[in-house]
Image (spheres, rainbow, N blue to C red):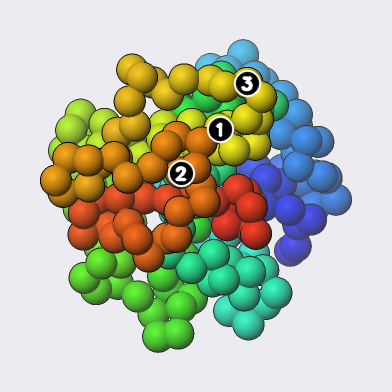
Amino acid sequence: MSFRNATAALAAMKFWEQRQYFTELDGEEADVLSRSLSLLQQSRDDTERSTFGGTFASEWAAMMEVQRAKFRKGSILASALVQTGDTFLLAHSSAATGTDSFWSDSGDGEGKNLLGMQLMLLRDELADPPRGGHGSWKEFISELHDVNTGMALAKEACEEIWQNFVRDAHDALVAQAFPEKKQPRRNGQPRFLLPDGSTPYKPESFYAAAPAKYSKSNKMSLAHKGHGYVVKA
């Protein structure tokens, strides 16, 4: 069975017995139907879901499988993902502000950006040779989250470290995409510092910096708006 987009595929896995209704829907239509089915389940007090797609134990695992199918090795999308290099990937949509705090940045930097996390892990898998050792995003993410479940290892501390990455990537995106807004960074300061404590960039130029300049061994991340460096599935 095939679907037109990742949103429809994931929604079908949530409601596997009704999966045939999602095959021809676009993302927005699939989201509407998914919400309607969720409300129907709640009205029947039938909210228990043992698996996703009859196979996967969590929504995280189901979405990762969807992304592997979408960015299958050798495809144009896989090539585009690999070409983003070593940049931090942010799933951002201003239309999602306050509505998607799990997969995206919620439009305001307060979402978990777990889709961005999955795409960085998948990009390491697709690299030739695959990345996973010292200095890779997989290594860094694995220090904070269980990559098989998406759960934070030491919940409060790890979630805050990751969330600060998401917030700074969001702020940098807004600074470049909408420079006329001149929105201040949170608390007036960027959270990414060099080992000596200095800040080598202005907020507005954060995107223009070369990715290689900020290594993850120093817990740095960089998100690009231009040249395809921000990937939103």
Q: Which residue is mark 1?
A: 175
Residue 136: which quarter of the image? bottom left
Q: Answer whether labels 2 and 3 touch (C-beta < 8 Å).
A: no
Residue at 57% x, 71% y is: 83
- Between the residue at mark 2 and the residue at mark 3, the CA separation in whole angstroms equals 16 Å
For the N terminus, give its image quadrant. bottom right
Is residue 221 visible in this depiction of the protein? yes
Label 2 neighbourhood size at 10 Å, few (<14), some (14-19), many (20+)?
A: many
Q: Which residue is mark 2?
A: 206
Residue at 46% x, 44% y is: 206
Q: Answer whether labels 1 and 2 touch (C-beta < 8 Å).
A: yes
Tell me the amino acid under the disc marked 3.
Lys
Q: Is residue 65 above or below residue 190?
A: below
Q: Which residue is mark 3?
A: 181
> Of callouts 2 and 3, which one flags the residue occurring earlier in the amino acid sequence?
3
Residue at 14% x, 46% y is: 196
Label 3 neighbourhood size at 10 Å, few (<14), some (14-19), many (20+)?
A: few
Is residue 102 visible in this depiction of the protein? no
Is residue 32 shown left or right of residue 86? right
Q: SS for tag 1?
A: helix
Tell me the amino acid under the disc marked 1.
Ala
